[in-house]
Amino acid sequence: MINIGIIEDNHFLLSNYREFLEDFQECKVMFACKSIEEFMALPVTYPDVKVILLDITLPGISGIEGLREVRRLYPDTKVIVLSGHEEQQYIIEAIKNGASGYVIKSSRLSDIYQSVMDTVQSGASLSPRAAHLLITHINKDPLESIKDKLTRREYELVALLKEGYSYKEMAAKLFVTVFTVNQHLKKVYFKLNVSTKSELISKILSNNLFSTLFFILIQVNYLNFKFI
């Protein structure tokens, strides 16, 4: 038996999720709450709950904030985030805060059931839309976020710097002097509020660091995510 908890503020969706899941013989909904506050006020805990479905947009304490509280009260329970948000940052934030799955609310009810089953069996899961959004973010050029702040020449130099070129090699490649390279990069440092080359590279890579690490862990099956 898979015991399930649901936290969803929309009464219609809450009823739909509960009725749909309980149609399966192997599923039993132990509690259904409309907010994190209601969840925290439950008179008893349910140690046998294996999966909690958590809406990310809730009144009062939000789903992302509440995720930490859910994980504190149910450290051994898998949490699948249900969200209408299709932006990558929500998926990443949810996973960073302990979610084992992420399902876009526009998905079919059968996808939610499949996510529950895959999470119980494999440890984690992502709906197809969430997986697509995350992979798009992983593949995004980390320089994209600073492109609008730089001139074309400054952007070229930063791109070469990221690839490991020395000042002398950059000067030769762009047919300018080392002095010119140095002057351009001083302007870049000022615009990006850094003072050294290592700080600049760190700032660039930090834009994509979590996603890259996450992707590597998936590739080696460390996180055991299943894309449904």
Image (spheres, rainbow, N blue to C red):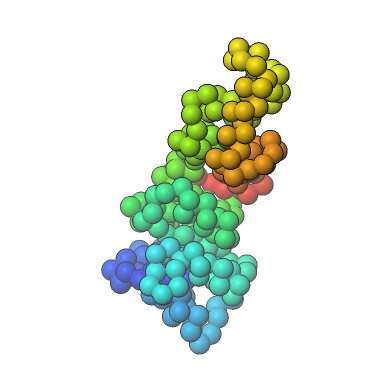
- The residue drawn where x is 43% and y is 63% is 56
Query: Does 93 sit above or below residue 31?
Result: above
Q: Nearer the viewer, residue 182 or 226?
A: 182
Q: Residue 54, position in %: x, y?
A: 45, 65
Q: Residue 138, position in %: x, y?
A: 53, 39
Q: Is residue 6 visible?
A: no
Q: Nearer the viewer, residue 112 or 142?
A: 142
Query: Does 172 sit above or below residue 22?
Result: above
Report whether 72 appears left or right of 62. Answer: right
Q: Residue 95, position in %: x, y?
A: 55, 55
Q: Residue 193, position in %: x, y?
A: 59, 45
- The residue drawn where x is 61% and y is 38% is 189
Number of dots carrying numbers: 0
Q: Nearer the viewer, residue 117 or 98?
A: 98
Report whether 27 appears left or right of 180. Answer: left
- The residue drawn where x is 71% and y is 19% is 168
In the figure, residue 57 lies in which quadrant? bottom left
Query: Does 140 sit above or below residue 46?
Result: above
Single out the residue that lies furthest toward the bottom: 43
Q: Is residue 98 visible?
A: yes
- The residue drawn where x is 47% and y is 71% is 5
Report whether 33 appears left or right of 208. Answer: left
